Amino acid sequence: MYVAIAIALLVVGSVLFHVLSPWWQTPLASNWGSIDTALDVTLLICAAAFIILNLFLAYMLMKYRHRPGLKAHYEPENTKLEKRLTFWTGIGIAGMLAPGLIAWNQYVTVPKDAAVIEATGQQWQWAFRYPGADGVLGSASIGHVSDDNPFGLNPRDPYARDDVLVETNELHLPINRPVKVVLRSKDVLHDFYVPQFRAKMDLVPGIVTYFWMTPTVGGTYEILCAELCGVGHYQMRGTVVVDQQPAYDAWLAEQMTYGQILASAEQARVQLASRDTPSTETLASARMAR
Amino acid sequence: MATIADDLRPLHHPKSWVGKYVWSQDHKIIAIQYAVTAIGVGIFALVLSFIMRLQLALPGQFQFIQPDNYLQFVTMHGMIMVVYLLTALLLGGFGNYLIPLMIGARDMVFPFVNMLSYWFYLLSVIVLFAGLFVPGGPTGGGWTLYPPQTILEGTPGASWGILMMMASLAIFVVAFTMGGLNYVTTVLQARTKGMTLMRMPCSVWGIFVASIMGLLAFPALFVAAIMTVFDSIAGTSFFVPTIVSMGKTLGHAGGSPILFQHLFWFFGHPEVYIVALPAFGIVSDLISVHARKNLFGYRMMVWAIIIIGALSFFVWAHHMYVSGMNPYFGFFFATSTLIIAIPTAIKVYNWLLTLWRGNIHFHVPMLFAIAFLFTFIHGGLSGLFLGNVSVDVPLSDTFFVIGHFHMVMGVSPVLVIFGAIYHWYPKITGRMWDERLARLHFWITFIGAYAIFLPMHYIGMLGVPRRYYALGETVFIPQSVHYANMGITIAAGIVFAAQALFFYNMIVSLFRGAKADPNPWGAASLEWQTAETPPGHGNWGATLPTVYRWAYDYSVPGAARDFIPQNEAPGGTAEPHPS
């Protein structure tokens, strides 16, 4: 009998916990309202099922608890009732699956006009690449990665020369413009996760993955890694700054392109050779300069 | 009707104490060996989880918890709980004990292989624990063991630990295959006269279907383990593409990390149901017995078990929505995943409807069954969020996932296991446990477990990621989350300590418990009708029982008692079940 009361109290307690809890989704800062809608519909249907089923359980535990002289009813099955329950469950399932699939369809359909930006992960930091003036990300592969070429860009690819490289864990995005975030990993699985954007995708070594979104609220957000990637996993943080277009353009103009980096590295090498110093300090400082 | 002649030549007999209790071929002893070993490693994994909770409540306060061994605790906890505790206990423990007794057999059909199954299981446990002492310690790659991470130096145990883990898993698969073949063959071949498939108790159905699933799913884990070992020591590239690890380009080329994930989850998702189906079956029987009412919709319940088992092989990639696999797979796997909710929901309805107009006795096993209903409804529903593809995107790899799967495949099956132990303890040992300690154990475990895992759903909704050694300063995570973490750890500590009540009760009752009635709950299924309690060698004495009815003839109108044992011949006014 106490267990009947306990079940009823747990239902009430869970609902109160839901209402009073300070923990719920962060305020949405992207276009993914459809994901939140699918979540809300799922929550509504599941909450109804949770409350009805458990209160029914509590009611029966109370009503049919053993008392002297009580005898249980004998009813092996009731096909009609079972069919009816199956049908209504199917309706409930379809009701939450529909908004889920609609949102997913949007999630996998990248708009044609989306800007392309690349995020690269390695243990345990982020780096970012913008396509530059030509709007095309140059080809890259892990085989090209070296100290001078941390992104592994193809030095012979003209599209790569104007790519803007950012190695500071800080990503800038223009507000209200759809962006396709292309993801590459140099070593292990990582996952690009900004709770406020809702969107998320793994970075997988060997292949290029992507997701898209439109940032809709300006501000600074944290990028977390959401796929276990080793001992530094919890420290693999980045920052994404959603700027108004002018601020974004100004910031982007300050960043070095691959071509500029190559040139300054070349210059440093020439200076190094002419001075005949064995030190690599200059080379390092040339890289630091950007 | 499938019948089998009783072979009176015993397949084996105990020759000495060692022959009886150590190198035993008796399914009842093997069951206890399995169960004790599984619970032993489970306690170790429970301690690990409490260490993790200490770190999450008071990050950085404990010198012995560092980022590397934290991940090792995470990994060992997960792997032990899922494979070495739940699978081994439900199939090796309950499967071994219940199948022959419930279907009226003298033993498993291959007693020697059954014995080997246990010893291979023990070997896998020994190898697993040996992994704690190899250079670098055990692997810290998470229980999912995703390469390339698990075999690279940024992960603890990347050289030796992962090899020991994979070796242990491979041995476990061998052990399970021997056990599983036995369970399946025994159910198909050794049922006593009159025991049709559709008269078997749901416990046997759950264990039977789970065993078939294990035989189909574990090979995927086995090959994934072997291929990872090759990638690690033989320079192959099954799962590892060209990568630069810590500034060094490795020699691998062309492998696919996602291939491993497919193999892993092709095992891993059925594995969830390998754990769940025996629990479903057992809880069906507990509810029916203690509500003194037939299981409602038995045929539908059996079909639901079979359908869930079959469908569970078509949903694995719902663990991989954001893995970078072809995103269009999401449509298929979301649909198949939500469809599986329908037979699962039917099971819940039928459990509830079994209580309807029942005569509910709140015995301790029943309390655990009721608690299971509550936590399973909760955990099952939170799974719909994660199955519903786009809703999974913000929630994957957060505490919501932890809350969900602990509720649905941690707390729920464990509640059933406790209920089942209390239920069958009088038959297994011939003694009764202490009622008050058992009730206290129930209340703390049930309420405490809910207090642990309910808040995790909400923290995950906020976006707090899982497998983080420390949350650090993160703007979107308010201070209240840290308080929640402390509260959860306190609840975990209480639940953890309360398990002492259970072990004390079980061990002391073994020696001092009151002598148990051979059928204290008035159950109709065969295992309660044995001549001796505990059942002797060969289970049934001189003749095998003959079965005349299903296992759920409770409160039959006109019958003298409120249950009719399966082996009671029809007569008087008692009507046998129409099927």
Image (cartoon, coloured by chain):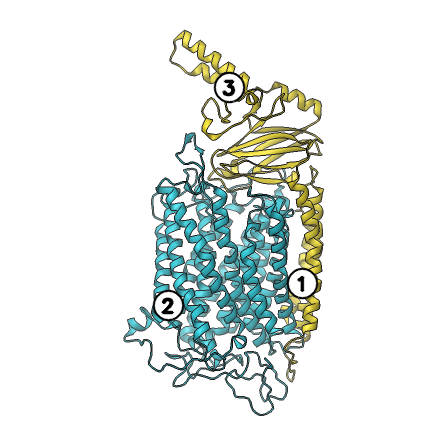
Q: Which amino acid does label 3 sit on?
A: Met
As drawn, the residue found furthest toward the top would be A274
Give the colour chain B carries in the figure: cyan
Provide the secondary structure element on which disc 3 rests. Answer: helix
- Depth-wise, is mark 1 or mark 3 nearer the camera? 3
Q: In the visual, does B195 lie left or right of B451?
A: left
The type of residue carrying mark 1 is: Leu
- Residue A84 is left or right of residue B422, and the answer is right
* Residue at mark 3: A288
x then y, percent, for residue B20: 32, 73
Quarter assignment of residue B152: top left
Which secondary structure, mark 2?
helix
Amino acid carrying label 2: it is: Asn
Q: Which residue is drawn at 44% across and 13% down?
A: A269
Residue for badge 2? B114
Chain appearing in yellow on the rendered image:
A
State whether residue B367 is above or below residue A74. Answer: above
Q: Name the residue under label 1.
A: A9
Neighbourhood count class around disc 1 (C-alpha, 10 Å): few under 14, some 14–19, many 20 upward: some
Compute the Cα span from label 2 to label 1: 46 Å
User: At 64% from the left edge and 77% from the top edge, which residue is drawn?
Assistant: B358
Residues at marks 1 and 3 touching, judged by CB atoms closer than 8 Å = no
